[in-house]
Image (cartoon, rainbow, N blue to C red):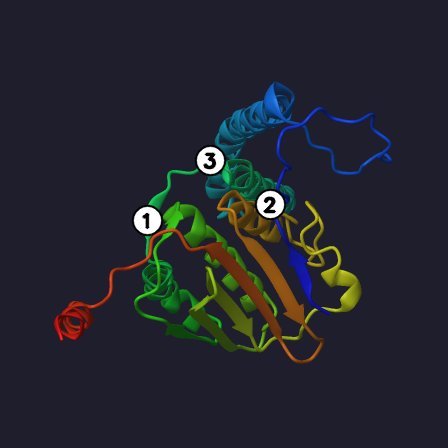
């Protein structure tokens, strides 16, 4: 069952009629009224990110002191100390889990903060493949890039787009515990530059597909439920869309589509050819 997430586009500013929408329905308005929710959202994001930092700093101190305690006690043969070591290990494991959740939360909070540059999507994906291939091999994963050349440039924050690709690739990797293949394909479709991330994993049941992009939803015991929502937030911040097509037992395809902004000039030979045709 395909699942698409498309950013909503606000209508042109006009005097809003009296609202008859049920609770939870999308609402939009022009002018300053339209800016206020965006400003409030940005403020909440900033506060949430700051709070995560404030939690992370003392948590790092706790982890460091736990490590020191562990080193002091690890060589002891005293039964009471050995019991304490098991408790310390449990605390260290839970601290690591909380740190992972905070890292994922910070990624989600910052997903809309962009520094855009005109970039070639194929080049950004190739840089990711070069970096991630050694880790993929450790898990028996083969990355197969099929990247189109001469794509129109996309106005993007390359760091955030790479984060989106990383999240999708790790998601695919976790769906193939015995190893497999992940294909990364770029192409142009109409006025969109697209990236397909395709795996040979177990696929996603229909009921799960409907919840994929919900914040904090996860089917994994150690999952944060923020990986795919972060991807969605990054793509939508670029004016793009994300689409999932999956079937249990047949793998999954995620498609990211970004609007074309900068057309590449024709090759120099073509320009000369057109000039020659025109002179005839």
Residue 70: which numbered mark, if any?
A: none
Q: Nearer the viewer, mark 1 or mark 3?
A: 1
Residue found at x 51% / y 59%:
257
Mark 3 and mark 2: span between their CA atoms? 25 Å
- Residue 210 image offset from top left, x and y in percent: 75, 58
- How packed mark 1 is, by other alpha carbons closer than 10 Å (few <14, some 14-19, many 20 or more), is some
**Is residue 62 or residue 161 the one in the foreground?**
161
Dot 1: element: strand
Q: Nearer the viewer, residue 195 or 32?
A: 32
Residue wearing tag 1: 118
Please tell me which residue lies in front, 114 or 261.
Answer: 261
The crowd level at tag 2 (other Cα within 10 Å; few <14, some 14-19, many 20+) is some
Splitting the image into 4 quarters, where does residue 87 fall? top right
Question: Given this view, does label 3 or label 2 mark the residue nearer the observer?
Answer: 3
Do the CB atoms of the residues marked 2 and 1 lie less than 8 Å apart?
Answer: no
Is residue 171 in view from this perspective? yes
The answer to whether 161 appears left or right of 231 in the picture is left
* Closer to the camera in the image, 70 or 231: 231
Q: Nearer the viewer, mark 2 or mark 1?
A: 1
Check if mark 3's residue and mark 2's residue have beta carbons within 8 Å: no
Q: Residue at x 50, y 78 (%)?
A: 181
User: Could you say where residue 37 lies in the image, as x and y percent from the top left?
Assistant: 64, 25
Give residue 20's position: percent from left, percent from top. Answer: 87, 32
Q: Is residue 228 above or below residue 139?
A: above
Q: Earlier in the sequence, mark 1 or mark 3?
A: 3
- Is 193 left or right of 3, judged from the image as shown? left
Q: Quadrant of residue 276?
A: bottom left
Marks 1/3: CA distance? 16 Å
> In the rendered image, is residue 79 in sight?
no
Mark 2, residue position = 97
């Amino acid at each position: 069952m395909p699942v698409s997430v498309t950013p909503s586009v606000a209508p042109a500013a006009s005097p809003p009629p009296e609202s008859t929408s049920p609770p939870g329905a999308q609402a939009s308005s022009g002018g300053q009224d339209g800016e206020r929710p965006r400003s409030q959202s940005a403020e909440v994001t900033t506060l949430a990110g700051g709070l995560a930092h404030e939690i992370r700093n003392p948590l790092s101190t706790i982890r460091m002191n736990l490590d020191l305690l562990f080193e002091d006690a690890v060589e002891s043969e005293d039964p009471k100390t050995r019991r304490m070591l098991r408790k310390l290990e449990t605390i260290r494991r839970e601290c690591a889990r909380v740190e992972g959740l905070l890292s994922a939360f910070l990624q989600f909070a910052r997903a809309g903060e962009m520094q855009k540059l005109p970039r070639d999507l194929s080049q950004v994906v190739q840089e990711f493949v070069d970096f991630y291939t050694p880790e993929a091999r450790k898990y028996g994963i083969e990355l197969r890039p099929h990247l189109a050349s001469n794509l129109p440039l996309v106005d993007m924050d390359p760091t955030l787009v790479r984060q989106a690709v990383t999240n999708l690739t790790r998601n695919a990797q976790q769906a193939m515990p015995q190893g497999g293949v992940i294909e990364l394909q770029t192409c142009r479709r109409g006025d969109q530059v697209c990236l397909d991330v395709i795996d040979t994993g177990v696929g996603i049941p229909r009921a799960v597909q409907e919840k994929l992009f919900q914040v904090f939803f996860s089917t994994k015991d150690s999952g944060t439920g923020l990986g795919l929502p972060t991807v969605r937030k990054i793509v939508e911040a670029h004016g793009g869309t994300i689409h999932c097509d999956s079937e249990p037992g047949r793998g999954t395809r995620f498609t990211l589509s970004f609007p074309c902004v900068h057309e590449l000039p024709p090759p120099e030979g073509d320009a000369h050819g057109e000039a020659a045709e025109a002179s005839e």
